[in-house]
Image: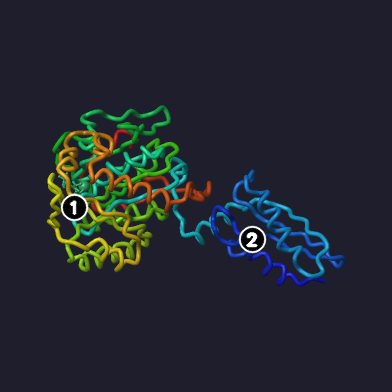
Amino acid sequence: MIDRDAIRKALEVVIDPELHRSIVELDMVRSIEPSANGVVDVTVSLTPPGCPIKGHFQTAVAEAVEALEGVTHVNVYFDVLSDSQKAALQQKLGRASLPAGALAQVANVLCIGSGKGGVGKSTLTANLAAALMGEGKRVGVLDADVWGYSIPRMYGLGSTRPDVSAERKIIPLTAHGVRVMSIGFFVEEDAAVVWRGPMLHKALTQFLQDVEWGALDYLLVDLPPGTGDVSMTLAQLLPQAQFLIVTTPQPTAQKVARRAAHMADKVALEIGGVIENMSSFTTPSGERFTIFGEGGGKELADELDVPLLGRVPLTMPLREQSDGGVPLVIEDPDDPAAQAIHQIARGLIAMTPAALPVLPLVEVAPADDAPPASPKPVGMSLPMA
Ligand SMILES: Nc1ncnc2c1ncn2[C@@H]1O[C@H](COP(=O)(O)OP(=O)(O)OP(=O)(O)O)[C@@H](O)[C@H]1O
Ligand SMILES: [Mg+2]
């Protein structure tokens, strides 16, 4: 009789096309039953019941096992992973707390962060989102800078308050085709809002779970400067997110690199790449000045062993548009900074999967249970809280 272990070994070549791992490694081979006449029954567990890639498994499993000597026929059967098996699989994939519900239809989450402030995170977030839109993608922007939000201004969204649906979900505002959510929609302009600890955690949780994001190819998250609470909370809520690190070209990148790498390490999020901003300035007569130095982005990318996604030059229109309400990539796509941002958007599309293998499962604790009740929060509640 053919050895079970040999069959299991042969099945290692069968790759789940969504999860990019072998079905053996993913523990999806439920049973292997060889019989004396060379017939082998293999049962494979799938994640959703009506898995559209069943045909792929059928063929790949049969072919892999039939190649073994002594096998005359292979029957491939399917069952569905139990909830606990799905949870174990999700754990294995490092997506233990993937929020279900509102974010289940978001394919890619990209957090735009930096080691220090004022390097252009918000400007790049607003423009990258618009550039991704221009490439035909469905895009959302979450302004996670709860203390210094600037996305509403960059998108020309003033004092409009988002509606709340009958299901008590907040409907994001839409600007230039991008769905936008910001704490700025809920507070008076320039009001000093203190978001700390549990309150902050709750606000961010609500932005991710109680906002009707709908189906998105990309959710871009504009982080506050530094490596504090917000990043930690988001990393907990979004273990599948990638960090994009924005830096300026000064060759002091080493210091920032260490800080950024430390943050990524601390929050165990993958760094997708580095964007160098304020790279150089070219005068109308074509003279180029490297105002903030040169090479920092490359240095940082090398230090972190991630790609340099692009270099965005300093241009006056990019600075001016921050207050104008229309992203530069829409207003003046020929501006050199707009062109660089478009290029980065195309690079992002090339490096991110069309759809993340989101598993429709795992109960997420309701927001109210999440943080411990210690220090008394100072702040405010969102309308649907
Ligand atoms: N490439 C550029 N060319 C010209 N101006 C730029 C460029 N990038 C950013 N700016 C300007 O620099 C300033 C800071 O940018 P921005 O607010 O996007 O930075 P930030 O990293 O989000 O800051 P913070 O850390 O405070 O959130 C803004 O006035 C913006 O218009
Ligand atoms: Mg900002």
Crowdedness near tag 2: few (<14), some (14–19) or many (≥20) residues, C-alpha within 10 Å? many
Q: Nearer the viewer, residue 338 or 287?
A: 287
SS state under label 1: strand
Question: Which residue shows up at 32% across the image and 66% down it?
Answer: 304
Residue 60 occupies quadrant? bottom right
The amino acid type of the residue labelled 2 equals Val
Question: Which residue shows up at 13% across the image and 44% down it?
Answer: 284
Spot occupied by residue 87 in the image (x, y as percentages of width and height): 53, 55
**Disc 1 and disc 2 in contact, CB within 8 angstroms:** no
Spot occupied by residue 253 in the image (x, y as percentages of width and height): 21, 65
Q: Quadrant of the C terminus?
A: top left
Question: Which residue shows up at 36% across the image and 42% down it?
Answer: 132
Spot occupied by residue 144 in the image (x, y as percentages of width and height): 27, 46
Of callouts 1 and 2, the N-terminal one? 2
Which residue lies under the disc numbered 2? Answer: 14
Q: Is the CB of mark 1 within 8 Å of ligand 1?
A: yes
Residue 325 position (above or below residue 41): above
Using the numbered discs, state the Cα–Cα distance from disc 1 to disc 2 in whole angstroms: 46 Å
Q: Nearer the viewer, residue 308 or 361?
A: 308
User: Does 100 sit left or right of 13 as displayed?
Assistant: left
Question: Can residue 293 be seen in the rendering of this structure?
Answer: yes
Q: Nearer the viewer, residue 175 or 366?
A: 175
